[in-house]
Image (cartoon, rainbow, N blue to C red):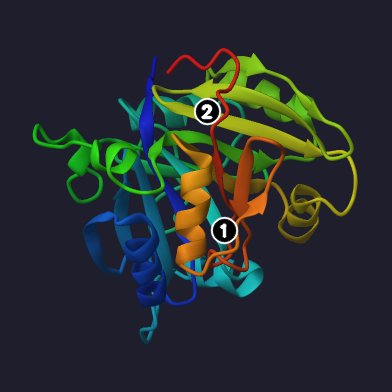
Amino acid sequence: MFKIGRLFHLTHVVSDLDAVDRWYDDIFSVTRYYHGFAKAAGRNASLIAVGEIIMEPMSPANVPNLRNLSVKRFHDRFGQHFHSIAWYVDDVADISTHLGKRGLRLWDVVGRPVTPPNEKYAIWTHPKETHGQLEFAVVGTNPIDPRLQPAWSSEFWPQRHPLGIERASHITVVVKDLPAARQFYCDVLGAKLLDQPETQGRKRSAYVAVGEDTIIELAQPTSSGSPEADDLERNGEGVHSLTFKTKDLARAAEFLKSKGMRPEADGSDGMVLGKDQAFGMVIGFTQRTIPNDPR
């Protein structure tokens, strides 16, 4: 049976990769370990570490006779937005067989349909079938992950960077049917249900632990006009936001303001940068600990 490991990366489609790279450098002081063009995937991308979190901002490749149009089509339809969640797994053939038995469609890196168990390196799901697009890959699919190297340390971000980032608190995925999404994550992916809170007049949530280090908030909006409801209406199910756990929310807010950002309060123990400030992303910061968090 396959095993889902740590979060590989969170992918973000952007219009101007160079501008986004500069923003990540300025705000997060990232470790960038890849920047380049991938012909097979039809995109330019960076891979960057913010502590233990890997982000993959990517833009459609501007080249003639583009082989893979999937990133371009995504950008044409949704603009700048979170794209997908990727996890490491120990056996791609095994998880593709597992998903295929449930009637889920799968693709490889060049957009060809996958017939399980033929693909051994990486697979992608259809976003309408898995409440947003998911990727599962073996270690070594992309350039060497610095977190897997003996000399790696993420101590800089919580101890010395003004944002005080300890880890990713959670990734929020907006969904139309919370029970169905919870069932998929728990029954199909083997996630563990942690908490099921409701934010009055805004959303019902289920926090689930996936793999070794990831918590997903499945969020079903309960009223129109909320950021989650607007995102679901405009873009369908998928990744809505990434929230970082910070040691000092007030200090993080002051730092963001010093960089020209406009953090907005999100409840009593959090704040967010809206999509107009973060290239189509919603980025949150919180000091809250999720109930039953196993990390």
As shown in the figure, which amino acid type bears the numbered disc 1? Met
- At label 2, counting other C-alpha atoms closer than 10 Å, the crowd grade (few under 14, some 14-19, many 20 or more) is many
Residue drawn 53% across the image and 67% down it: 279
Drawn side of residue 36 relative to residue 202, left or right: left
Examine the rendering and report whether any part of residue 43 can be seen: no
Toward the bottom, the furthest residue is 64
Q: Quadrant of residue 41?
A: bottom left
Viewer-nearest residue: 191 or 73:
191
Indicate which disc residue 114 carries: none
Does residue 148 appear to the left or right of 179 in the view shown?
left
User: Whole-percent x and y of residue 127?
Assistant: 62, 47
User: SS class of the residue under badge 1?
Assistant: loop
Q: Is residue 217 visible?
A: yes
- Quarter holding the N terminus? top left
Above or below for 205 versus 56: above
Count of numbered badges drawn on the protein = 2
Mark 2 lies on residue? 215
N-terminal label among 1 and 2: 2
Real-space Cα distance between discs 1 and 2?
Answer: 18 Å
